[in-house]
Amino acid sequence: MALPRAAREVLSLRALNRATLARQMLLARRRLTVTQAVERLAGLQAQAPNPPYIGLWSRLEGFRREQLTEALQKRRIVRMSTMRATLHLMTASDALAWRPLLEPVHQRGLLGNHKKALDGIDRAAVVEAGRALLAERPHTGAELGQALGVRWKGRETVSLAGLIRNNVPLVHLPPAGTWNSHQSALLQPLGDWLGEAVDATPATQDDLLLRYLAAFGPATLADAGAWSGLTGWKAVAERLRPQLRVFTGEDGQELFDLPRAPRPDADTPAPPRLVAEWDNLLLSHADRSRVLSEAHRARVFTVNGIVRGTVLLDGFVAGVWKIERAKNTVTVVLESFTRWSKADRIGVEKEALDLLAFASDGEGERHAVHLP
């Protein structure tokens, strides 16, 4: 029998913070392969090519850029649209198992972005034509739109390509998505790219909740919806409730978790960390207060859709960072939101210099850290 809320253990904000950081490998760097890490993290947001590399650097001991590049080239990791209909790096098996579940998210995204432009069109015919084009060879999104526009004259080519992207699971083929690669991605259906090399059992939404909690819990059902873009989590939680542990948050919210998942003491030390742009740490909960104060939100989530790289001190966002290049000098520019102690400054500056060593592209570069 489930305990009434009043009798459940209450998790403080700091306890939630430490549990999340532990699962996100931000309390201590781990010794894992790239594939193991991406699987445990339930994917990595991959809007731009470099942030996933930095995301793994901040989490893995001894991580080198070529390890992720090789995993992409060897098809162990794929870059494609998944949760929230946004680009992620996923293990090949998770991509195959999860993408069918996320179809409603992609259909909702299609309606939100292209509904008016696609009114009255035979969508099934467009999708069939797009599949035929992709069966011949990989295409960029622009190429797909232009080729379809020859048949559907007068239609916006961007929307025609969007119809294919939201109805066909498409992989961004490397070198797109690899370090410093900004070229237009060639697209290929997931099944064609992986062939028979990967076997995956289709996932259920129950499976997805368990994986989400393992990577981001304890969490509310609204958090699971914010992470995935899916609805219907209440029924899932009720089915799984007997095998889950349920806590109460400081505001009385119901928090679900795996019984044996790590929940470190709230006073567990959290070292300084530089977290990548668009990192899942900031994008996977409806309530981000476990890592980001609402007072600082506008300084991290910009009006033009950028999610800035952040500095964690004592587990919480205390500033932002960016890399600037000028002549032969590469600088991590830091912006603090709070007053940093001397020890915090030293710790952040060390992380910043380590990041520059990781991200360096030239032997003659001078590395610097700037904190106004």
Image (cartoon, grey):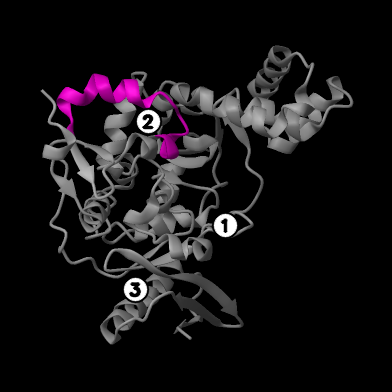
Identify the residue position indicated by label 3 in the image: 351
Viewer-closest of 269 and 248: 248
**Magenta highlight on residue 237:** yes
Residue found at the very far front of the displayed protein:
6
Estimate how packed mark 1 is, as few (under 14), some (14 to 19) or many (20 or more) residues with alpha carbons within 10 Å.
few
Q: Which residues are magenta?
A: 225-245
- C-alpha distance separating marks 2 and 1: 27 Å
Q: Is residue 157 above or below residue 311?
A: above
Q: Which mark is residue 94?
A: 2
Q: Earlier in the sequence, mark 3 or mark 1?
A: 1
Give the SS element for disc 3.
helix
Residue ID at (23%, 58%): 14
The answer to whether residue 109 is left or right of residue 363 is right
Q: Is residue 250 above or below residue 362?
A: above
Residue ID at (23%, 23%): 240
Residue ID at (47%, 41%): 88
